[in-house]
Amino acid sequence: MEPRATAHIPEMITLMETLIARGHAYVADGHVLFDVPSYEPYGKLSGNSRDEIVAGARVDVAPYKKDAADFVLWKPSTDDQPGWESPWGFGRPGWHLECSAMSHKHLGANFDIHGGGRDLIFPHHENEVAQTCAADPESGFARMWMHNGYLSVDGEKMSKSLGNFHTVRDLLEDWPGEALRFALLTAQYRQPLDFTFDLLKQAKASLDRFYNALAQSAEPAAGPVPDDVLAALNDDLNSPQAIFIMHSLADGVFRGEKGAGAALRGAGAVMGLLQSSAKEWFQSGDDDEAGEIEDLIAQRLAARANKDFAEADRIRDDLKARGIDLMDGPEGTTWRRT
Ligand SMILES: [Zn+2]
């Protein structure tokens, strides 16, 4: 479900009416404001006390606020701004209100997980909790908060003005999506992650290693998720630890350990990794080029049949220079991108 704030204006109005009736909100100067001092647990999520918030508030606190920490639930709109009719005039909701109205409607008074970036803990998530729980004393709101760490690029904060950001769409032009996913899983989600092309290269190299192991393994089916991988993921999604274990499973495959291949596939399945065959992984890329490579392999085979080894070697060397390795085996010649 991808609910839209603009489709939930009646729910927001009801929520504000409840907050006003319960003494947690008031109307002033065309605004509806949340009365922070009326809600005692305010600040519990972020660890900010009301006093700290007030001390940090800008000097020019809006005159219609009873308390400097109070925040806007509804504000007036002029005719050229988006707005809706309400009991308090033509206006629009504050930023936080929509999330309380939509989560309460679609998920209920209590739900398991609320996600979001660290930068949203205060004031946004703190205010969501206050709005929802002050209006509905039955509500515990989210049982668990999962706040993800900042993503930087080359050691700098990503920003539109610096232009130092990459879109997934752009990255997918040159990199397999699986390498992107792997790179993002190398940091535990609460920790900051510095995105670099070196990180992507390392992610790709790790996946090459895993797919090499799977290509060697005689165990084609995924086993159950290994216990230690599950334990790592149950520990607040410790994905770096799970990846570490996957590397030792790959070691096991290279040593010929029984069950290691099935365990590696099982670990990959729960991580959203290793879902392709090794052949698909190593040959992924431009399909037109794949056809051309197959043609060149056939030409090389013909050259060898004619004992023109110089031509056969030239074709192999040309492909190598393009980053394509040929492997001659009992079942013919296969290829992979390096
Ligand atoms: Zn929100």
Image (spheres, rainbow, N blue to C red):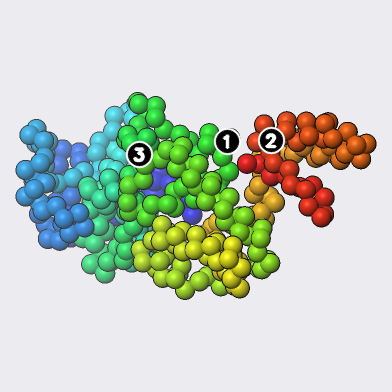
Q: Quadrant of residue 295?
A: top right
Q: Which residue is mark 1?
A: 174
Q: Which amino acid, by three-letter code, is at mark 1?
A: Asp
Tell me if mark 1 has few (under 14), some (14-19) or many (20+) residues whose alpha carbon lies within 10 angstroms of its own. Answer: few
Res. 152 mark: 3
The residue closer to the viewer here, 54 or 9, is: 54
Tell me if mark 3 has few (under 14), some (14-19) or many (20+) residues whose alpha carbon lies within 10 angstroms of its own. Answer: some
- State which tag comes first along the sequence, 2 or 1: 1
Q: CA distance from mark 3 to mark 1?
A: 20 Å
Q: Which amino acid, by three-letter code, is at mark 2?
A: Lys
Q: Position of residue 184 (x, y in %)?
A: 44, 48
Q: Position of residue 58 (x, y in %)?
A: 11, 35
User: From what the image shows, is residue 307 above or below residue 256?
Assistant: above
Foreground disc of the pair 2, 1: 2
Quadrant assignment for the C terminus:
top right
Q: CA distance from mark 2 to mark 3?
A: 35 Å
Q: Which residue is mark 2?
A: 320
Q: Is residue 157 left or right of residue 72?
A: right
Q: Position of residue 337 (x, y in %)?
A: 66, 41
Q: Is residue 76 at all visible to an observer of this figure?
A: yes
Q: CA distance from mark 2 to mark 1?
A: 19 Å
The residue closer to the viewer here, 152 or 327, is: 327
Q: Which amino acid, by three-letter code, is at mark 3?
A: Ser
